[in-house]
Image (cartoon, rainbow, N blue to C red):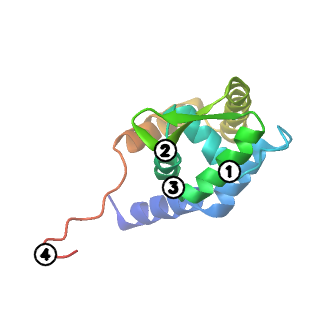
Amino acid sequence: MSTDDITTIADALGSVLGRDFRGGLYEYLTADLHDAVDAGAYPVLSGLDRAGAVSAAGLGHLVGLDRSVVSRRASRLTAAGLVSSAPDPDDARASLLTLSPAGVRLVGVMRARLADALEQRLEAWPAADRRDFARLLKCFALAGPLQPPHRSGRR
């Protein structure tokens, strides 16, 4: 692969992962849904949808947030009836978070909004390009997270 291709991919990936892109997307997906739901709540709700019952620490690891941030956001969502908390049967010190039925419905609305946003963003692309993009992005994601190179003798 050429250096130009690598640079183009790296720049695009940096843009998609950047705060402005993510924040704008999360604001779009959560706009006017519920008083307790804002862009900051999106990773918690979406992460719970993907993970099922999980501790705040586990969810934080999944979505890239500190456990204390997840706990604060989950507390607000629990008070709003969108998240449920129950004791962890394997660890008496921890609680497991799950989406409530209302939370499941709300995440469904956000997923529908995401599908609409993607459709709008890609509608001008030729069908073959959309299929290629979907296939290649899936391949990239299924390869798993990037890992730091192994450095023998270093910590």
Q: CA distance from mark 1 to mark 4?
A: 40 Å
Q: Nearer the viewer, residue 81 or 37?
A: 81
Q: Secondary structure at mark 4?
A: loop
| Numbered badge on residue 81 | none
Which circle, 2 or 1, is nearer the viewer? 2
Write down the residue under mark 3: 64
Q: CA distance from mark 3 to mark 2?
A: 19 Å
Three-letter code for the amino acid on which mark 3 is drawn: Gly
Say which label, 2 or 1, has the lower sequence index. 1
Q: Secondary structure at mark 3?
A: loop
- Answer few, some or many: residues within 10 Å of disc 2's Cα (few below 14, many 20 plus, some between 14 and 19): some
Q: CA distance from mark 2 to mark 1?
A: 16 Å
Three-letter code for the amino acid on which mark 1 is drawn: Arg
Question: For the point 54% across and 59% down, which residue is it?
Answer: 66
| Numbered badge on residue 73 | 1
Q: Single out the residue that lies furthest toward the bottom.
A: 154
| Left or right of residue 93, residue 116 in this image | right
Question: For the point 39% across and 35% down, which residue is it?
Answer: 90
Q: Nearer the viewer, residue 40 or 129?
A: 40
Say which label, 2 or 4, has the lower sequence index. 2
Say which label, 1 or 4, has the lower sequence index. 1
Question: For the point 61% across and 57% down, which residue is it?
Answer: 69
Q: CA distance from mark 2 to mark 4?
A: 36 Å
Which circle, 2 or 4, is nearer the viewer? 2
- Cβ–Cβ below 8 Å for labels 3 and 1? no
In the rendered image, is residue 2 in sight?
yes
Q: CA distance from mark 4 to mark 3?
A: 28 Å
- Residue 33 % position (x, y): 82, 37
| Numbered badge on residue 153 | 4
Three-letter code for the amino acid on which mark 4 is drawn: Gly
Three-letter code for the amino acid on which mark 2 is drawn: Ala
